[in-house]
Protein backbone atom coordinates (compact mmCIF):
# COMPACT_ATOMS: atom_id res chain seq x y z
CA UNK A 1 0.00 0.00 0.00
CA UNK A 2 3.03 2.25 0.10
CA UNK A 3 4.12 1.56 -3.47
CA UNK A 4 4.23 4.60 -5.75
CA UNK A 5 3.75 7.01 -2.84
CA UNK A 6 5.90 9.92 -1.72
CA UNK A 7 6.51 12.23 1.21
CA UNK A 8 6.75 9.86 4.19
CA UNK A 9 6.32 11.85 7.39
CA UNK A 10 5.31 11.13 10.98
CA UNK A 11 1.80 11.90 12.21
CA UNK A 12 0.82 12.71 15.79
CA UNK A 13 -1.74 10.54 17.57
CA UNK A 14 -3.70 11.50 20.66
CA UNK A 15 -3.38 10.63 23.36
CA UNK A 16 0.38 10.51 22.80
CA UNK A 17 1.59 6.94 23.15
CA UNK A 18 5.15 5.79 22.42
CA UNK A 19 3.79 2.33 21.54
CA UNK A 20 1.50 3.63 18.76
CA UNK A 21 3.27 5.04 15.71
CA UNK A 22 1.74 6.74 12.68
CA UNK A 23 3.07 7.94 9.31
CA UNK A 24 1.48 9.52 6.25
CA UNK A 25 2.31 9.29 2.55
CA UNK A 26 0.87 10.98 -0.54
CA UNK A 27 -0.56 8.57 -3.10
CA UNK A 28 -1.95 9.17 -6.57
CA UNK A 29 -5.32 10.75 -7.38
CA UNK A 30 -5.20 13.05 -4.36
CA UNK A 31 -5.18 10.20 -1.85
CA UNK A 32 -3.27 10.19 1.40
CA UNK A 33 -2.54 7.03 3.36
CA UNK A 34 -2.01 6.86 7.08
CA UNK A 35 -0.12 3.87 8.45
CA UNK A 36 -0.86 3.35 12.15
CA UNK A 37 0.82 0.58 14.16
CA UNK A 38 -0.03 -0.55 17.70
CA UNK A 39 3.12 -2.09 19.17
CA UNK A 40 1.59 -2.28 22.65
CA UNK A 41 0.68 -5.44 24.49
CA UNK A 42 -2.97 -4.36 24.76
CA UNK A 43 -5.56 -2.64 22.54
CA UNK A 44 -5.32 1.11 22.04
CA UNK A 45 -7.73 3.76 20.78
CA UNK A 46 -6.22 6.88 19.25
CA UNK A 47 -7.37 9.98 17.44
CA UNK A 48 -5.67 11.42 14.36
CA UNK A 49 -6.39 14.78 12.74
CA UNK A 50 -7.79 14.07 9.27
CA UNK A 51 -9.28 16.35 6.65
CA UNK A 52 -12.13 15.08 4.56
CA UNK A 53 -15.32 13.25 5.43
CA UNK A 54 -14.75 9.60 4.50
CA UNK A 55 -12.05 6.96 4.74
CA UNK A 56 -11.27 3.36 3.80
CA UNK A 57 -9.58 1.16 6.38
CA UNK A 58 -7.47 -1.96 5.87
CA UNK A 59 -6.25 -3.88 8.93
CA UNK A 60 -3.36 -6.31 9.36
CA UNK A 61 -4.18 -8.33 12.45
CA UNK A 62 -2.21 -11.03 14.29
CA UNK A 63 -3.78 -14.46 13.95
CA UNK A 64 -3.10 -17.57 16.03
CA UNK A 65 -4.64 -20.70 14.49
CA UNK A 66 -3.68 -22.76 17.55
CA UNK A 67 -6.21 -20.97 19.74
CA UNK A 68 -3.48 -19.91 22.20
CA UNK A 69 -4.51 -16.26 21.61
CA UNK A 70 -0.98 -15.09 20.86
CA UNK A 71 -0.81 -11.54 19.53
CA UNK A 72 2.62 -9.90 19.39
CA UNK A 73 4.14 -13.32 18.73
CA UNK A 74 1.32 -14.70 16.56
CA UNK A 75 2.51 -17.09 13.84
CA UNK A 76 0.24 -15.60 11.14
CA UNK A 77 -1.54 -12.40 10.16
CA UNK A 78 -4.80 -11.63 8.41
CA UNK A 79 -5.39 -8.61 6.19
CA UNK A 80 -8.99 -7.43 6.34
CA UNK A 81 -9.75 -10.80 7.95
CA UNK A 82 -8.40 -12.68 4.93
CA UNK A 83 -5.42 -14.97 4.43
CA UNK A 84 -3.39 -16.18 1.52
CA UNK A 85 -4.91 -19.47 0.30
CA UNK A 86 -2.91 -22.72 0.53
CA UNK A 87 -2.31 -22.48 -3.23
CA UNK A 88 -0.70 -19.04 -2.75
CA UNK A 89 -3.54 -17.00 -4.23
CA UNK A 90 -4.68 -13.79 -2.56
CA UNK A 91 -8.46 -13.22 -2.29
CA UNK A 92 -8.02 -9.44 -2.40
CA UNK A 93 -8.49 -6.63 0.06
CA UNK A 94 -11.81 -5.97 1.77
CA UNK A 95 -11.50 -2.56 3.43
CA UNK A 96 -14.17 -1.11 5.65
CA UNK A 97 -15.44 2.42 5.09
CA UNK A 98 -16.20 5.10 7.63
CA UNK A 99 -16.79 8.76 8.25
CA UNK A 100 -14.49 11.33 9.78
CA UNK A 101 -16.13 13.29 12.59
CA UNK A 102 -15.23 17.00 12.93
CA UNK A 103 -11.77 16.60 11.43
CA UNK A 104 -10.81 13.72 13.73
CA UNK A 105 -10.43 10.05 12.90
CA UNK A 106 -11.08 7.77 15.89
CA UNK A 107 -9.23 4.49 15.45
CA UNK A 108 -9.40 1.44 17.72
CA UNK A 109 -6.43 -0.88 17.25
CA UNK A 110 -6.07 -4.39 18.56
CA UNK A 111 -2.89 -5.66 20.18
CA UNK A 112 -0.12 -5.78 17.58
CA UNK A 113 -2.46 -4.53 14.85
CA UNK A 114 -1.47 -2.28 11.94
CA UNK A 115 -3.97 -0.20 9.99
CA UNK A 116 -3.82 1.66 6.69
CA UNK A 117 -6.32 4.50 6.39
CA UNK A 118 -6.89 5.87 2.90
CA UNK A 119 -8.18 9.46 2.77
CA UNK A 120 -9.31 11.32 -0.34
CA UNK A 121 -8.93 15.05 -0.87
CA UNK A 122 -8.21 17.64 1.78
Image: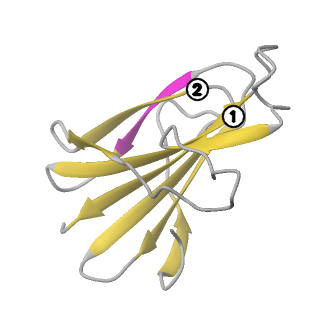
Q: Position of residue 108 (x, y in %)?
A: 45, 27
Q: For the residue labelled by badge 1, is the local secondary structure a helix, a strand or a loop?
A: strand
Check whether the beta carbons of the residues at disc 2 and disc 1 lie within 8 A of each other.
Answer: yes
As drawn, the label of residue 110 is: 2
Is residue 115 magenta-colored?
Answer: no
The mark that comes first in sequence, 2 or 1, is 1
Q: Quadrant of the C terminus?
A: bottom left
As drawn, the label of residue 89 is: none
Q: Position of residue 50 (x, y in %)?
A: 28, 51
What residue is shown at x 39% (from left), y 43% (from top)? 48
Foreground: 26 or 89? Answer: 89
Foreground: 114 or 67? Answer: 67
Span highlighted in magenta in the image: 44-48
What residue is shown at x 56% (from left), y 60% (from top)? 90
Foreground: 19 or 75? Answer: 75
What residue is shown at x 60% (from left), y 62% (from top)? 89
Q: Which quadrant of the structure image shows residue 42?
A: top right
Q: How many marks?
A: 2
Q: Residues within 10 Å of mark 1 (few under 14, many from 20)?
A: many
Q: Residues within 10 Å of mark 2 (few under 14, many from 20)?
A: many
- Residue 18 is left or right of residue 11, and the answer is right
Foreground: 107 or 2? Answer: 2
What residue is shown at x 77% (from left), y 14% (from top)? 67
- Residue 102 is left or right of residue 108, and the answer is left
Q: Which quadrant of the structure image shows residue 71?
A: top right
Our reading of the magenta stretch's main secondary structure is strand
Q: For the residue labelled by badge 2, is the local secondary structure a helix, a strand or a loop?
A: loop
Q: Position of residue 51 (x, y in %)?
A: 22, 56
As drawn, the label of residue 62 is: 1
Label 2, label 1: how far apart the Cα atoms are: 9 Å
Above or below, 26 against 12 in this view is: below
Render colour scheme = secondary structure
Amino acid sequence: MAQDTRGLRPVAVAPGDARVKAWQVQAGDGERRLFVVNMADRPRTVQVAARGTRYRLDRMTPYDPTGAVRTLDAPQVRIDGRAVAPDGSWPGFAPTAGRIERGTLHLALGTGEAAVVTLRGG
